[in-house]
Image (cartoon, rainbow, N blue to C red):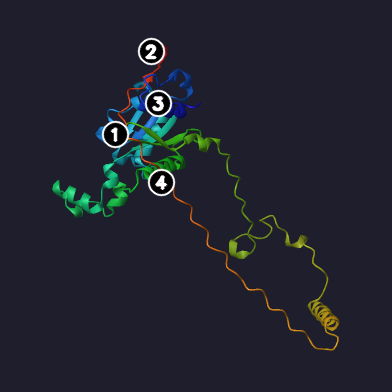
Amino acid sequence: MRLFEAILEANHRAVTGDGTAGVRVADYANELPVVALTCIDPRLNRFFPGVMGLPEEYFIWLRNAGNIITNPLSSTMRSLALACALKGGREVAVIGHTDCQVCKATVSGLTERFKALGIDRQQLPENLTDYFGLFASERQNVIKGVDIIRRSPLIGPKVPVHGLLVDVQTGRLESIVNGYDALDRPAAPPRMEMPSIGAGTGQSSASAGFNLGEMKFPELKIGEAARQAGGQAAEIQRQSDPIGQSAPAPAPPPIVAPPPPLAPARTIPAPPRAIPVPPPIRIHAPPRSGRR
């Protein structure tokens, strides 16, 4: 069992009231600490890192509004990269949460809120959606964040990047993206590029590994080929129509367009059960003296 598999199992057991649920962090020394990006919502303060069963020294907590990542070289990516390079983070998790206020925000509503703070519309960036990273789905926002991290040159290819969603009512963690899948997936084969021939590409046939002089063509003149083709056509017509009357050519079969592909069915996850906030997960931490 890997680290985040153990975290999710312990969390789900704790949510159902199992007071013995916990994560033995000593078994995952090579996968700790965890770097987590969450939202700034103060309702999350009581959950982390307890709902993950990790002690504070194994949990590097980064926060911004909506746990949003805008691009692979953004300031948030800089913090994630330094958390791995300087603080020794081994695995990364983007953790969204239910009932996110950034998800509910609209451009007009955001403009009015800034106006109440004495900030006019002309003082704000032109595209508020892009600048503030407004989104319509907490789950899609987590998936997008994980994808940006994976494409960033600042995060090593061997660092798992997970996507989770925490219920602010129950503390239950839901797995959105399993970061281990990308590591286990075989690398895609290199894309084969076809060599370009001709002056239009700026490369000669020789530079592309293609020697036109090495090709062998039949020694047949154009006029001779035409006469041979005409003779063959006449012979075929004579054998098929001995009285000199050509049979009408059969009509080509009608072209039937293939049916359009069916859109994949959307699976809507069932909402979590309304259950009490889970008790703190037991932390099986090694003795402090053993830490470097």
Can you say which quadrant of the picture contains the C terminus? top left
Checking the image for residue 288, the label placed there is 2
The residue where tag 1 is placed is 169
| Residue farthest bottom in this picture | 244
Residue shown at 35% from the left, 24% from the top:
17
**Residues at discs 3 and 4 in contact (Cβ within 8 Å):** no
The residue where tag 4 is placed is 268
Q: Secondary structure at mark 4?
A: loop
Query: How far is the residue under mark 2 from the one under mark 1?
Result: 33 Å
Q: Secondary structure at mark 2?
A: helix
Checking the image for residue 13, the label placed there is 3
Residue 96 is left or right of residue 178, and the answer is left
**Residues at discs 2 and 4 in contact (Cβ within 8 Å):** no
Q: Amino acid at mark 3?
A: Arg
The residue carrying pointer 4 sits among few (fewer than 14), some (14 to 19) or many (20 or more) residues within 10 Å by Cα, namely: few
Q: Secondary structure at mark 3?
A: helix
